[in-house]
Image (tube, grey):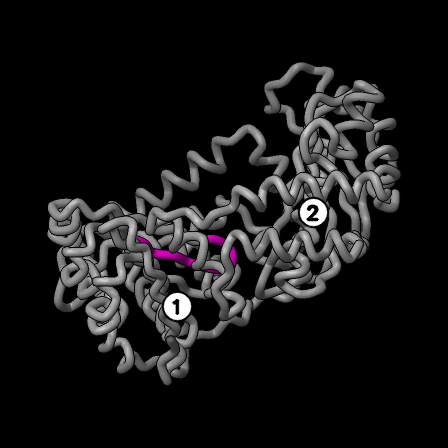
Amino acid sequence: MASENGLRVHYAQCDESELMSFHVLFKVGQDSETPDEFEFCHLLEHLQAQLTSLRYPNAQDNIARLEGLGVSSNAYCSNTQTCYHSTFVAEHVDTVVDMYVNMLLHFRPDHSVLEQEVNSVLRELEENFVNDIYHEADQEINELVYKNHRRAHGPLASIANVGDFHKDKGKQDRLKAFRARHYAPQNCCIVIAGPRSAKRKTLGLLAPLAQWSNLDGGSQTSPWKYTAPPPMAMHVHNSKLQVDSVRVEFHWLLRVVYQGNGELRSKCSLLYRLLAGGLGGRLIRKLRSELGIVYAVHVTYYMDKVNPDLSSFGIELTCSHKDVRTVVPELLKTMAKPVSEAEWRRLETLVKSSYEGSRVPKHPEIVAENLTTPFLWEDKIETVRSRYERQLDLIRRRVPMIKLGKPTYIFAVSNNKKLRVPNAV
């Protein structure tokens, strides 16, 4: 269901439970921040999660009200999206949805908890990043890969920007302008999973959002222009890395050629199974079983919906210093091999086994979580089974795997000052 103002709402029926899960998502994340707005998305996540508004102005009262009803709430933000979600017994839908609707229409931060939330954000940055032994190495890598982009700016820049936020009226005004610019109905979707009996009532409670008007806001355009660097292979020295001196931690990023949201995601999933899917995965088999130089290989992929050039496919592994000059060429050579008929058959077996057990979970919270991202970015509801069906279709048609284009970045992180990494080109 879509309103004239651009807001989209989807209600998924889950009659096996009296629980309801309510998710509000925005197409805004930290990539939207200019240098004087660093961490604003994170701050807003903390403040709006308290559901304060003109009608419900007190954060502590709101938390007590929701906890008294047994409501479980949380929020998160990423580079490209922000989500607020609550799970509760459906009989409490009036209270919960009314608080969300008022927050969206008439948000007002509770200044009595502003310093508390600023300190909470600062602690998260320090604990999750600054105190991480990989922080300096990761920061150096990001500055090389994402030069002149938001992602090149680490937590220290964010800490400097928000440390005095609760005292700086100018920053508070900029936060208000940031919200007005990005948090708009055409930039938002709401996904609810709950019993059939509560559907009509819930949609009725959301009716006031049809009057939500911020038609000048809702920008999805990042202020940053990304230009990929040339291929590189380098050693990043990290003296704080507390590992055995003969080990190297690899961070390997491959930029992918964008070929459409759904198909690219499916191809990356198949490539993951091909390379590192169990002991039969191509890289596991080559580097562990045949050469005996690594224990495990981890493959990850990230699809950026706003800026496809920022999508990446990554491989992480650990090896000894003496094996680096063997591992890097083997990685590139093993990746470049065409998919054999035996590998296609193995992939089909792996996906079929997952497909047969892929019933959409019945718990409303999991149902809502499974539906949110496809609905937010692709304007459609996609189930777990439909994703496996698409993968099987690609396998049966023997569709070529994604083209791993340049640039290729290979970073070996270690506490050894003299390590040399073979060229990635």
Is residue 272 among what the camera can see?
yes
Q: Pick whichever of labels 1 and 2 is earlier in the sequence.
A: 1
Q: Which residue is mark 1?
A: 189
> How far is mark 1 from mark 2, CA to CA?
29 Å
Is 79 magenta? The answer is yes
Quadrant of residue 282 within the rendered picture = top right
Answer left or right for 307 relative to 98.
right
Instruction: Name above or below for residue 241 compared with residue 214.
Output: above
- Extreme residue toward the front, this view: 356
Question: Which residue occupies the foreground of this view, 232 or 89?
Answer: 89
Callout 1 touching callout 2 (CB < 8 Å): no
| Left or right of 157 in this view: 20 | left
Label 2, secondary structure: give it: helix
Percent position of residue 36, x then y: 45, 61
Residue at (48, 57) in percent of width and height: 30
- Residue at the image point whose x is 76% and y is 19% from the top: 320
Q: Secondary structure at mark 1?
A: strand
Q: Nearer the viewer, residue 115 or 307?
A: 307
The residue indicated by pointer 2 is: 270
Residue at x 71%, y 62% (from the top left corner): 258
The amino acid on which the numbered mark 2 sits, given as a three-letter code, is Leu
Instruction: Classify mark 1: residues with Cα within 10 Å, few (<14), some (14-19) or many (20+).
Output: many
Tell me where residue 157 appears, x and y as whole percent: 49, 49
Q: Is residue 166 visible?
A: no
Q: Where are the magenta residues, as a range?
A: 78-85
Q: Residue at x 58, y 65 (%)?
A: 306
Q: Is residue 145 above or below residue 329?
A: below
For residue 292, the mark is: none
**Residue 231 as seen in the image, left or right of residue 247:** right
* Residue 288 colored in magenta in the image: no
**Residue 339's spot in the image, x, y percent?**
84, 45
